[in-house]
């Protein structure tokens, strides 16, 4: 699944990947070649499903089993290095948590646009003051119509 990763694009992918590797080391996680390739795939522009990430990793390392890739993805999510995002009714896509941002998803043509996390400040404050609820904008997409489809 693709989209303009305008927000993620502001952060050099290499920096984001190195930060994630450092966190992984801190958490006592092993840095395996498969994990490195997986982080490369996640930090590449766009919104990737687990299947697409597995395909990318296996293109460079065909010996890595798909289940190993999925297990590593779960581990990165558990360590909160990676966010799982649901865009419309499609399968989950993955982002680095350090470049958290929200999404707009066009219900007509399927276009995806990224919104900076700050765009959710008012909603965040309202949910927090009313319910003590911490919203996770990076994990969902707001449906609507894009400029071309209205
Ligand atoms: Zn559209
Ligand atoms: Zn995005």
Image: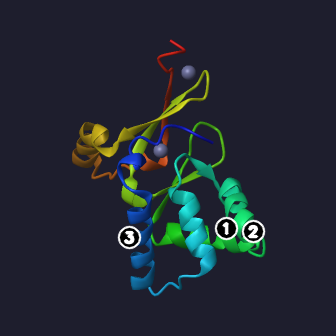
Mark 3, secondary structure of its residue = helix
Q: Residues at badges 2 and 1 in contact (C-beta under 8 Å)?
A: yes
Q: Quadrant of ligand 1?
A: top right
Mark 1, secondary structure of its residue = helix
Determine which of the numbered discs, if any, sits on residue 16 in the image.
none
Disc 1 Cβ-to-ligand 2 distance below 8 Å: no
Q: Nearer the viewer, residue 112 or 45?
A: 45
The residue identified by callout 2 is: 66
Mark 2, secondary structure of its residue = helix
* First in sequence: mark 3 vs mark 2: 3
Rendered location of residue 106, percent (x, y): 54, 26
Rendered location of residue 82, percent (x, y): 48, 62
Which residue is depicted at the point 66% across and 47% down? 91
Q: 59 left or right of 136?
A: right
Q: Is residue 114 above or below residue 11?
A: above
Q: Nearer the viewer, residue 112 or 44?
A: 44
Rendered location of residue 111, percent (x, y): 56, 29
Rendered location of residue 86, percent (x, y): 56, 45
The residue identified by callout 1 is: 70
Q: Residues within 10 Å of mark 3 (few under 14, many from 20)?
A: some
Q: Is residue 66 above or below residue 52?
A: below
Q: Nearer the viewer, residue 74 or 55?
A: 55
Disc 3 Cβ-to-ligand 2 distance below 8 Å: no
């Amino acid at each position: 699944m693709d989209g303009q990763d305008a927000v993620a694009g502001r952060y050099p992918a290499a920096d984001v990947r190195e930060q994630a590797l450092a966190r992984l080391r801190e958490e006592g996680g092993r840095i395996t070649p498969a994990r490195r390739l997986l982080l490369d795939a996640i930090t590449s522009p766009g919104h990737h499903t687990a299947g697409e990430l597995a395909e990318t990793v296996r293109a460079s390392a065909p010996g890595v089993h798909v289940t190993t890739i999925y297990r590593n993805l779960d581990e990165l999510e558990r360590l909160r290095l990676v966010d799982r995002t649901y865009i419309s009714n499609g399968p989950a896509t993955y982002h680095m948590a350090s470049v958290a941002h929200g999404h707009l998803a066009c219900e007509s043509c399927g276009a995806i646009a990224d919104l900076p996390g700050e765009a959710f400040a008012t909603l965040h404050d309202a949910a927090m003051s009313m319910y003590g609820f911490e919203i996770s904008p990076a994990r969902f997409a707001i449906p609507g119509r894009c400029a071309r489809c209205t």
